[in-house]
Each structure stands twice: as C-alpha cells, then as structure tokens.
Amino acid sequence: MRELDSQAIAAAAERQAGLTKPAGSLGELERLGEQLSGIAACCPPPIPSRPLVVVAAGDHGVIAEGVTPWPQEVTGQMVDNFLAGGAAINVLARVVGADVVVVDAGVNRPQPERDGLAILKVGRLTGNIRIEPAMSRDEAAELVDRGRRLAEERAAGGVDLLVTGDMGIGNTTPSAAIVSYVTGRSPQEVTGRGTGIGDEMLAHKVAVIADAVGRCDPSLDGLGIASQLGGYEIAVLAGVMLGGAGAGVPVIVDGVISLAAALVAYRIEPLVRGYLVAGHRSMEPGASAALEFLGLRPLLDLNLRLGEGSGGVLAVPLVKAAAGILAEMATFDSAGVSEK
C-alpha cells in the first residue's frame, strides 16, 4: 500500500480552480475528486464503472447476554434474502448500477455453495465478548487475509470501487466495543439502539460493552482488537478495505459496523485511511465517534441505521460525480468564459 500521490492531488486542486465555477462551489465533491486523484495517481481520475458491494455476514456469541430482541437465525435468513435479490441493499445496488457479493464470514448454520456467495468462514459463532475473546488471533488474521484476497481478486477482475456492508444479529455490540476501545470514548457515548431496543435493554447493552472493553489489554494491535472484540464479518471487512487500498481501489465505508472494521484496518495499516470514503453518517452514535477519529467526512446524512451497505451504496453516484467533474467539466479557458 502506498501513500496517496501528492502530485496528483495538487494537480486536481489546480484543475478545480480552473473549472467554470466559483472556487469551492462544489464543496465536498471537490475534496473527493482530489482524494480520488491521489488514489489513482493521476488527474483526472478514472470514473468508476464497476462498483461492488461486499456484504459480510456473521453471528455473535454476545447475543447470549440479551443485547438484541432479534433471533440469531435472522442472520442466515437475510443471507438467503440477499442472494434472492430481495433486500434493501439489492434494490439500492440495482438503482446505482452496483453488483453485490455476499460473504459468509461466520454464519451459524451450514451454507450450500450458491452464485453470489463467497464462503470465507473459519467458525460459525464468535465467543461472548463480555467474558471471552471473540475468536483466536490466528482466526482474526485468517479472516482479514481472506477479505484482503477477495478484494484483490475482484479488483484484478475489473472492480474499481468497493462498498462495504454487513449483516449480523447483535453486531452493533462488538462494533460499539471496538469504537469505544480505539477512540477512548465511553461505552455510553458510542452505544446506540441498533435495531430499535428500549431504554432498559440499552442500559444493559452499555454494561455488556463496558465489561468487554474493560477486560482487554490497553495496548492491543489491530488483530488483537479484532480477536478480542470483533465479529467475523468485521474482520473480513477490515481485510476488504486493506485489499482494496492495496489494489489502488477506493472503498466506500457504510455505517457503524463498517466503521468498526475501518478502525481495525487502520490499526493494522494507517495508510488505509486515505483510500476510505465515508458514505454516510449513521444514526448510531459510534459511527460519528469513528468518523471523527479517522478524520472522515460523510457524504450523506439520511438518518439511516439499516446496515447492509445501504448508506454506502447510495454514495456511489457521488463518487462517480466527483471523478466526472474533473474529467469532463470545461475550464474557463476551454469554454471561453471570463473569470472574476
């Protein structure tokens, strides 16, 4: 993985200044265009044409603590729904012209081989993070590596924009625990209602997360964080981000689960941050804490809290637009327009 190309970023900034518009008038699209130029090491950057949403699914032992009202079997049922094309992410991906691949990162049931499904699991249920590690360090390393290889293979096949998504009943609990651990925010600050829990369950969820974070060594590295507090899908998504960045492909990050994975990826290799695009600001408070820690500015704020990659995929047209502005918009000189 290399640092973003500073010369390409400077060239993009210079080109933005010469386009037929007041300076800075396209706001975040201008900043994003410069980032895309730095990733591609050229200006203008290519306009993405092969976006892919990676929806990683896994089950969590911490639901034994009563942190969600939803039954665990919903994870596997939603995998079926994704593969049948009937979930929100499928609809949104079709609307923006993105493909979807579903990853069984650790769903607690056997999975038959099916089109559109990548089976990368090393286990079927994480440990209960309140009292034990989610997985072994070797398992975390293997899942990160499998996610990395998936991204590299898809990039080699022509994918030029990745979007991260997730599915896993109970997975806002490990995500909040990771955000709390990495950012230093209290569990109360970063824990939300997930799929819609009441006040009593929320207070209990905060206590579970506090216990999970409290039993961890304060000097864990990225793999240690994934091992102690993560989910199988979080480890895979961290690998997808690292693999995408290593292949020079921008990665749109979805909500709090994807952002927890981004924190893990950042602790493994800080250069990954330059390749990440924050698709939206999730309603989960841990998302805002992670965005601030990583220095990422979300493109959208739609009060979403679904997951699946839904907020991330909605940002795909904006990424295309940012690249398109640099590639296709006329300059003052070429259009014969007077500058101020």
Image (cartoon, rainbow, N blue to C red):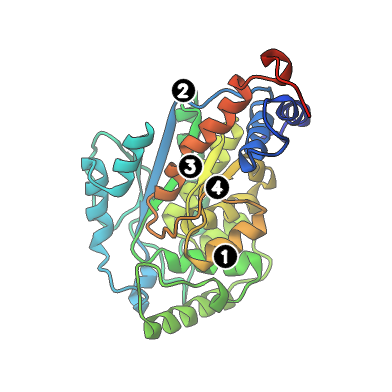
Which disc is residue 158 wearing?
Answer: 2
CA gap between label 4 and label 2 equals 25 Å
CA gap between label 3 and label 2 equals 20 Å
Q: Secondary structure at mark 2?
A: loop
How would you rate the neighbour count of disc 2 (Cα within 10 Å): few for under 14, some for 14-19, many for 20 or more?
few
Q: Does 230 sit left or right of 122 as displayed?
A: right
Residue ID for mark 3: 315
Quarter of the image where one finds residue 169: bottom left
Q: Of discs 4 and 2, which sits in the foreground?
A: 4
Residue ID for mark 1: 179
Q: Residue at x 46, y 25 (%)?
A: 49
Viewer can see residue 146 = no
- Give the residue type that dot 1 points to: Val
- Give the residue type that dot 2 points to: Gly
Does residue 330 sit above or below 86 in this rendering?
above
Mark positioned earlier in the residue sequence (1 or 2): 2
Residue ID for mark 4: 299
